[in-house]
Amino acid sequence: MSTIWSENNRRRLSIALIALAALVLAGATLAVYVKRNAFEPARFADHAQATLESPAVRQIAADKITTEVIEQVDPDVVAVRPLLSAATAAVIDTTAFKRLFRSAVLEAHRSAVENRLDNAVLVLANIGVLVEQSLRRLSPEVADQIPAGFDANLVRVAEGSWESDLATTAHRTRTLAWVLPLASLLLFATAMAVAPRRREALARAALAIALAGAALVVAYAFVRSLVIYRFTEGTERDAAEAVWLEFMRGFLYLAAGLATAGSALAAAASGTMRTIDIDTRARELAASAARPPSTPLRRVVWALALIAAGVWAMIDPLALARTIAFLAGFLLVFRGANELISLSMPNGTRARTAPATTTAGPSFSRRFAVFAATVAVVFVAAAAIGTAMIGEDGLQRLGVIADTRSCNGSEELCAKRFDEVTYAATHNSMSDKTYAGGWLFPEQDGPVSAQLAAGVRALMLDVYYGFPGTRVYTDGDRSSPSVRDALYDEFGREFVAAADRIRRTLSKPDADARRRMYVCHGFCELGATPIEETFSQIREFLEDNPREVLSIVFEDYVPTADLAAEIEKAGLSDLAYRDGLGPPWPKLEEMIDDDGRVLMLAENSTSPAVPWIHPAFKVMQDTPFSFANLAALKSRHSCDFARGDEDSSIFLINHWIDTAPAPRPSNARRANSREVMMPRVKRCEKKRARRANLIAVDFYGQGDLMAVTDELNGVE
């Protein structure tokens, strides 16, 4: 009798452990999903960006932003609320905003979890810039009523309202995401160990896994109904539904996959070990659900379950119907798998109804094949459902949004140091032939924004002071005294004299006229872009592409402090590389993680007060830059030492044909071809014992610059 009692106790303990393991498994499933989708910044930002595809979400967002601006930034703006709201709605529906929004969410999430607020504030302020610019297009008169310092006020709103409690929750969830799965596994293993009949315990464990998945599906549907029920107004409810589906649909797939996998395993156990009769159990379950239990405690639970089901039916009848349909589907999957597996048993019939000694059934090999194929198919289907949102990177792998694992477009580059990578560069990057202001003698095919989008990762910008007008008038007094000598060196005295004659045809502004900083080349009268426009394009690109590293080489003819002030005003100083100059240089992923993604170099002067603008030719060495024709570019002297120190670790190859004052796209097409560029790069690398880091060209769209840099980097 004691042996029987011991066996019964072991069976009961095993059942209790299996039940506890299934409960812990349900918690582990939730913890793993929340960790990956709520506390991994990139995945969370992906989901957040995807919610903007819903018109209801866009409308709610526009209303919230408008209200925030009016209440927190300037209450007087309420006078133009309709236009401000329309401008905001128009901005939200643009690709630029969606990318910027993703970047803002990404940095805000990191700020909350890692206590890094600066970049989140920066991006939030830029949303204000987009809204203001959109309003200016709709109505310039109304936009003039937007208060000065709009960005700064919006930043203060962000700083004042930010909460950092998320960091603690994230840490706890990450801990649970590995503790709970391990605990569940240990509980299942212990249940198997203490069970008197381990095959029977395996069947129960499989059924418990299936029921845990099914319970999670029911919980998902019930909680969804409660969340959506809180919103009674149509637009708000639609927006809540869109947000819920985007963030939680993957959890539904995971729970369904768990239920399917468990049912497949339980079906296999039922067919081969004769322990589970799904038809009988289903009938017993339905009968017990229809009549009150015998004990008071069970009757209370039964009554509460009926009330909850009734309330659910009233709140969200469709969700309840879908849940019932899922449970029916779960039973059908189990029943179908059980029937197929029964074919692998002797006689091809279910074990409970056919004696083992009846007519010979299928051969062993055939039974095994049916069994293996059935289990494999069901498990593959379950795995596909379960990993659709968990095991893959979802939107990123579909290419809907930017990749968040690569560095400068490739995962392989993340582990390389800055000086182990080759970057496409543009000479006189600001000299854009498409600029509305009109550039004489342009040297590039498009603006800085187009260059960055095409793959350029190093910009060469000349900076001067000038006075605005029909043509910008260069402020030679405020700019560096070395300007004149530099112009003679590059253009020659004859061209400089001609340019001076053009300048004299312009009326010089009054002495008290407001000078501005421009990017131009020698004479701003021949073409100039306000520096804030160029910096705005750079900032927008960096915000849209948080995994890109850039270099900016300034040919600076303005005081360093003034240049730094413009960079800070544009919000780029927070992204400047501030650490020591190599070698050894940091890896690209380290620069990205530290938010030091922009290496800023100045050719002419630097200041200890601005340590993040580094002296260019203390860091960099280059080749000659004046080649009259293609033959000169191909000559062995084209790789000679020009500027910098011989031990400088960054190597710039100047690769263009100089036909000043008028560069020619036809020359660039030949010079930038792979047949010319690749041999010269290899020759210069060998001669200088340096990797080519920057390859600077005219007319970046001509030839094969991007293909050559990809090949040098080993990127397909």
Image (cartoon, helix red, strand yellow):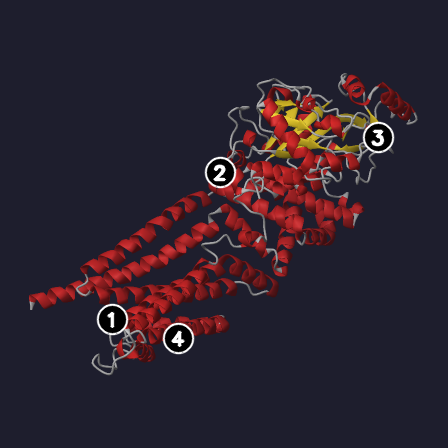
Q: Of label 2 and label 3, which has the lower sequence position?
A: 2
Q: Is residue 572 above or below residue 207?
A: above
How many angstroms separate mark 4 from mark 2 (CA)? 50 Å
Front: mark 4 or 2: 4
Looking at the rendered structure, the kind of residue marked 4 is Leu
Between disc 1 and disc 2, whose residue precedes? Answer: 2
Q: Which residue is mark 4?
A: 332
Q: Looking at the image, can residue 531 be seen?
A: yes
Identified by mark 1, the residue type is: Met
Residue annotated with mark 1: 273
Picture quadrant where residue 285 is located: bottom left
Query: Badge 4: few (under 14), some or many (20 or more) residues near its Cα, within 10 Å?
Result: few
Which of discs 2 and 3 lies nearer the camera? The answer is: 3
Residue where numbered disc 3 is placed: 526
Instruction: Please tell me whether residue 614 is drawn above or below residue 673 in the rendered image.
Output: above
- Which mark is first along the chain, 3 or 1? 1
**Does residue 636 appear left or right of residue 467 in this picture?**
left
Lower sequence index among marks 1 and 4: 1
Q: Secondary structure at mark 1?
A: helix
Say which quarter of the image contains residue 486: top right
Q: Nearer the viewer, residue 287 or 406?
A: 406
- Of mark 4 and mark 2, the one earlier in the sequence is 2
Q: Position of residue 120 (x, y in %)?
A: 57, 41
Mark 1 → mark 2, Cα distance in angstroms: 55 Å
The percent coordinates of residue 217 (x first, y second) are: 42, 65
Q: Residues within 10 Å of mark 2 (few under 14, many from 20)?
A: some
Res. 115 mark: 2
Q: What whole-number distance in Å separates the C-alpha atoms at marks 3 and 4?
A: 77 Å
Question: In the rendered view, would you say 311 is above or below 42?
Answer: below
Quadrant of the snapshot with the N terminus? bottom left
How crowded pointer 1 is (Cα within 10 Å; few <14, some 14-19, many 20+) is rated as some
Closer to viewer: mark 1 or mark 2: 1
